[in-house]
Image (cartoon, grey):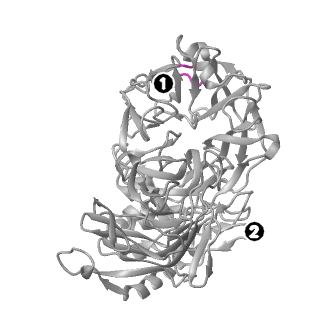
């Protein structure tokens, strides 16, 4: 096994390297490491993800069906080892680890002796099986060491079901800002600015749990352990319990450590910690952690005369397969007002390469934004609904009645190559008492009966409780538009809509003024009315946009046993970081599948489905700021579903 799996690169490579593991060689997919001013994830040979390559790499539309079918065939076989879904090199490594067992009974309160296999990630400062996000750490003097933000070391195996013990032997210089990460974005902050230790994340009450003065001393080695026995979880520092909780015994997920998390709002790293790890291992059931899919920059800060690009929206025109990536090109900076154009880049090869920047809408120094592309599969037209405002007016000024926002629509009949003269539709879709109006952002949908639906939100006054999520509809293939329904409750914001398999609609929206949770609403009349909004307590979200998508490829149903699997991409943290893709098998009632796509600073995203069932994701990400670039990735369903639907074991 290689010493580590580095999914970061600072060198552009023009050639493709073929995947070696025998299970995947038949796919003919290839991997590269493009970099566009930020560190971008690069898939490597032991990945379930479908990578993005350069021109000349094999396409994905004709390749993934066989992989999905293998997942389908294995999902129901109780006696099939998990390794049968994994690259052959990992199977051999796991066999080597299986003989390294530890009796936990002497250290934990267990009813009987528990013998668990050990997986070693770092040993005497040498990387054994780790996954880097960001630049690699340095191995010296029997310590694996790094400083700075967005430099993650993840265990190379994810923890499965049942009992386990995670152990890290560490030391930290200036511990302020350093974190131990588990189950996605949940983390232990070793020391805050006032000297206290703290737990942060959705596992904890109010997403934050102070633990009192930090016991971490500068440059003094210590042992951190995370232990689950039955339904009890215990976090320990040098064998002293810091925190205990009741937790289910299901799939646990990822664990890792980082010297610091970026302060995304200011695009800076406030941590001065130097983290050193000598030993890192877990006793328990594990399986290889597949690296996230490769990312390719489509829009990059400072390019084409724009200060920054924000607000991605993604669509795919089925007849030609053309991908359309929309964004706001912001001239004056990151602010939501000012000189902002609507821009577009197109891909004719599934996202491998992208054409030149096109300016779709430019209203001089005014604001044009919130793109909502909708593909009419009956006529072949691509509609683009968007909004405009005076560039000198802020959102708060518009809410105070000093100006207004207007809704417009334009269309393309040639896969986005050219666009019609925009049409103002405010008088048809905007209520008389509305002040702020924003569409989407992100793709709209065409219902099974042909209706076009665009998500939106508005305010009726300056009060914080006046924000409302809504829909705009067309029943004549975009010729005319009208207001759909509004979500009762007054706390909605940017939204995304999907049609469920029973014909009803699900809306997921940013809950603007309440706790860090996403809101949901339903419609049984094609978006004409909506049920009162309800925040889902288990659905973390830091007041940020998300994208909802219903899958249509039959392979999803075959793999999961559910028709119309719903996907949702959103931020899985209380901060704008850990972009996560989730799957629901029951129309949005529960979301048992969740995989983080990128752990560093990230924000808005949008998704589309390819004809083979793979998923394209366009999202904001960076090393210190979420707004460094807008990148594109392709998700292999195996990467998303395997932790839940792969056979347990390992």
* Residue density around tag 1, few if under 14, some if 14–19, many if 20 or more, within 10 Å: some
Badge 2 marks a residue whose secondary structure is loop
Which dot marks residue 464? 1
Q: Closer to the N terminus: mark 1 or mark 2?
A: 2
Could you tell whether 393 is left or right of 92 in the image?
right
Residue labelled with disc 2: 13
Task: Identify the residue shown where x is 71% and y is 23%.
Answer: 422
Q: Quadrant of the N terminus?
A: bottom right
Task: Identify the residue shown where x is 74% and y is 70%.
Answer: 15
Viewer-proximal residue, 137 or 26? 137
Name the residue at the right extreme: 305
Name the residue at the top extreme: 432
Viewer-proximal residue, 487 or 14? 487
Could you tell whether 533 is left or right of 231 in the image?
right
Could you tell whether 393 is left or right of 446 in the image?
right
Task: Identify the residue shown where x is 49% and y is 20%.
Answer: 463
Could you tell whether 582 is left or right of 302 in the image?
left
Q: What segment carries the magenta color?
A: 468-482
Answer yes or no: is residue 617 visible: no
- Up-down: is 341 above or below 137? above
- Up-down: is 457 above or below 552? above
Answer yes or no: is residue 290 visible: yes
Q: Quadrant of the C terminus?
A: bottom left
- x and y percent of residue 228 in the render? 30, 68
Badge 1 marks a residue whose secondary structure is helix
- x and y percent of residue 67 in the render? 49, 66
Name the residue at the left extreme: 111
- x and y percent of residue 603 in the render? 58, 45
Which dot marks residue 330? none
Whole-angstrom CA distance, mark 1 to mark 2, is 50 Å
- Up-down: is 597 above or below 356? below
Viewer-proximal residue, 51 or 477? 51
């Amino acid at each position: 096994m290689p010493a580590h799996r580095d999914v970061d690169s600072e060198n552009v490579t023009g050639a493709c390297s073929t995947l070696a593991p025998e299970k995947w060689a038949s796919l003919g997919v290839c991997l590269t490491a493009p970099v566009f001013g930020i560190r971008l994830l690069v898939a490597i040979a032991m990945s379930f993800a479908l990578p993005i390559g350069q021109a000349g790499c094999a396409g994905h539309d004709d390749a993934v069906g066989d992989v999905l079918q293998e997942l389908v065939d294995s999902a129901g076989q109780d006696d099939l080892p998990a390794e049968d879904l994994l690259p052959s090199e990992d199977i051999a490594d796991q066999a080597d680890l299986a003989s390294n067992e530890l009796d936990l009974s002497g250290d934990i309160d267990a009813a009987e002796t528990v013998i668990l296999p050990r997986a070693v990630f770092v040993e005497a400062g040498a990387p054994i099986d780790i996954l880097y996000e960001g630049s690699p750490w340095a191995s010296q003097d029997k310590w694996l060491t790094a400083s700075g933000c967005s430099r993650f070391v993840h265990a190379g195996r994810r923890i499965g079901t049942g009992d386990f013990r995670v152990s890290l032997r560490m030391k930290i210089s200036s511990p302020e800002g350093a974190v131990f990460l588990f189950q996605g974005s949940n983390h232990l902050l070793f020391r805050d600015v006032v000297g206290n230790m703290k737990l942060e994340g959705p596992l904890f009450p109010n997403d934050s749990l102070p633990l009192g003065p930090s016991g971490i001393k500068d440059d003094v080695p210590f042992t951190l352990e995370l232990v689950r026995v039955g339904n009890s979880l215990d976090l320990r520092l040098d064998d002293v319990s810091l925190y205990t909780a009741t937790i289910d015994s299901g799939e646990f997920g990822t664990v890792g450590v980082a010297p610091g998390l970026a302060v995304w709002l200011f695009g800076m790293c406030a941590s001065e910690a130097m983290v050193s790890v000598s030993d890192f291992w877990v006793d328990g059931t594990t399986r290889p952690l597949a690296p996230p899919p490769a990312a390719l920059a489509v829009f990059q800060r400072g390019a084409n005369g724009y200060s920054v690009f924000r607000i991605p929206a993604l669509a795919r025109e089925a007849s030609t397969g053309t991908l359309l990536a929309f964004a706001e090109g912001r001239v004056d900076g990151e602010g939501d007002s000012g000189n902002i154009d609507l821009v577009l880049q197109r891909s004719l090869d599934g996202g491998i390469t992208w054409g030149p920047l096109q300016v779709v809408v430019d209203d001089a120094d005014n604001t044009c934004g919130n793109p909502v592309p909708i593909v009419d599969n009956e006529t072949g037209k691509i509609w683009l609904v968007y909004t405009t405002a005076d560039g000198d007016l802020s959102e708060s000024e518009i809410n105070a009645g000093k100006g207004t926002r207007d809704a417009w629509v334009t269309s393309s009949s040639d896969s986005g190559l050219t666009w019609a003269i925009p049409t103002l539709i405010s008088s048809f879709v905007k209520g008389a008492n509305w002040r702020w109006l924003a569409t989407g952002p992100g793709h709209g949908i065409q219902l099974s009966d042909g209706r076009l639906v665009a998500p939106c939100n508005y305010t009726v006054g300056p009060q914080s409780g006046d924000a409302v999520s809504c829909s705009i509809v067309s029943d004549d293939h975009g010729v005319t538009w009208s207001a759909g329904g509004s979500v009762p409750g007054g706390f909605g914001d940017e939204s995304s809509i999907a049609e469920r398999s029973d014909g009803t609609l699900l809306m997921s929206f940013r809950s603007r003024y309440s706790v860090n949770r996403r809101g949901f609403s339903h419609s049984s009349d094609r978006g004409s009315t909506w049920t009162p909004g309800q925040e889902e307590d288990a659905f973390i979200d830091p007041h940020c946009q998300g994208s909802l998508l219903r899958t249509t490829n039959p392979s999803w149903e075959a793999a999961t046993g559910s028709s119309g699997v719903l996907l949702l991409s959103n931020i899985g943290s209380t901060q704008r970081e850990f972009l996560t893709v989730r799957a629901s098998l029951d129309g949005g009632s529960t979301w048992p599948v969740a995989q983080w796509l990128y752990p560093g600073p990230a924000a808005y995203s949008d998704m589309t489905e390819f004809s083979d069932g793979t998923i394209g994701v366009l999202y904001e990400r960076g090393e210190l700021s979420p707004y460094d670039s807008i990148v594109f990735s392709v998700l292999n369903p195996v990467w998303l579903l395997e932790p839940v639907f792969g056979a347990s074991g390992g």
